[in-house]
Image: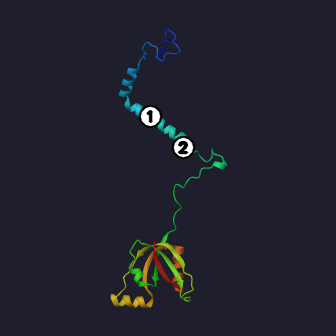
Amino acid sequence: MVVVIPVPSQPRPADSRQVPHFAPLRVRGGRHRLRRLLRHRRRAMAAGLAMTAAALVAAGPRDAERVGDAERVVRPRAHPAPAAPLVTAPVRIADAATVRLLRRGDRVDVVAADGSAVGGGKPRVVAAGARVAEVPEADGGADAGAESAAEGGALVVLSVPRATAARLAGAGATARLAVTLC
């Protein structure tokens, strides 16, 4: 590409604000390049995408090996740690009316309160965020439901990790259990 820049023939006066006249500037091949670019749009698009990808890679975060100890990049794990296998644990809740509010799939916290201390015992959370697997119906109709409420509440089946199931069984033997919806 050849660009010709002409020099003005007369020197410009210092007080004049007019632009001197120049011969037209002609660039060779400009019109043909545009036509060629329009004919080869796919190549132009691919080249533009390649340049954009290269710029994004160059501007992205650096690897931990190339960065000093003070500037280490902390990356999240690609896969979360595997969760503990879940087991189903039947739990008798002291308040049968609360159990009737529960539906399959609900998340509940199981709270244990010692029966010996009526007003002074501290409740503790035995299972947090347990999923309700099933809410079995009382056997024998309405009369059996009243009897089960009198003898100690209603049954609910929870899906929890094995260690939590062991804590639930121990707490159910020594304390009254209640649930709160999450």
Q: In this view, does 78 lie above or below 99?
A: above
Could you tell me which residue is drawn at 52 percent across and 54 percent down? 78
Q: Name the residue under label 2.
A: 60
When asked about the image quadrant of residue 90, the answer is bottom left
Q: Can residue 78 be seen in this view?
A: yes
For disc 1, the marked residue is 48
Q: Which amino acid does label 1 sit on?
A: Gly
- Picture coordinates of residue 175, whole percent (x, y): 53, 85
Residue at 42 percent across and 72 percent down: it is: 106
Amino acid identity at mark 2: Gly
> Residue placed at 41% from the left, 80% from the top?
99
Foreground residue among 4 and 11: 11
What secondary structure is found at the residue carrying circle 1?
helix
Residue occupying the far left of the picture: 141
* Label pair 2/1, CB-CB below 8 angstroms: no
Q: What element carries label 2?
A: loop
Left or right: residue 71 versus residue 174 is right
> Is 106 situated above or below 51?
below
- Residue reaching furthest to the right: 69
Q: How many labels does the image show?
A: 2
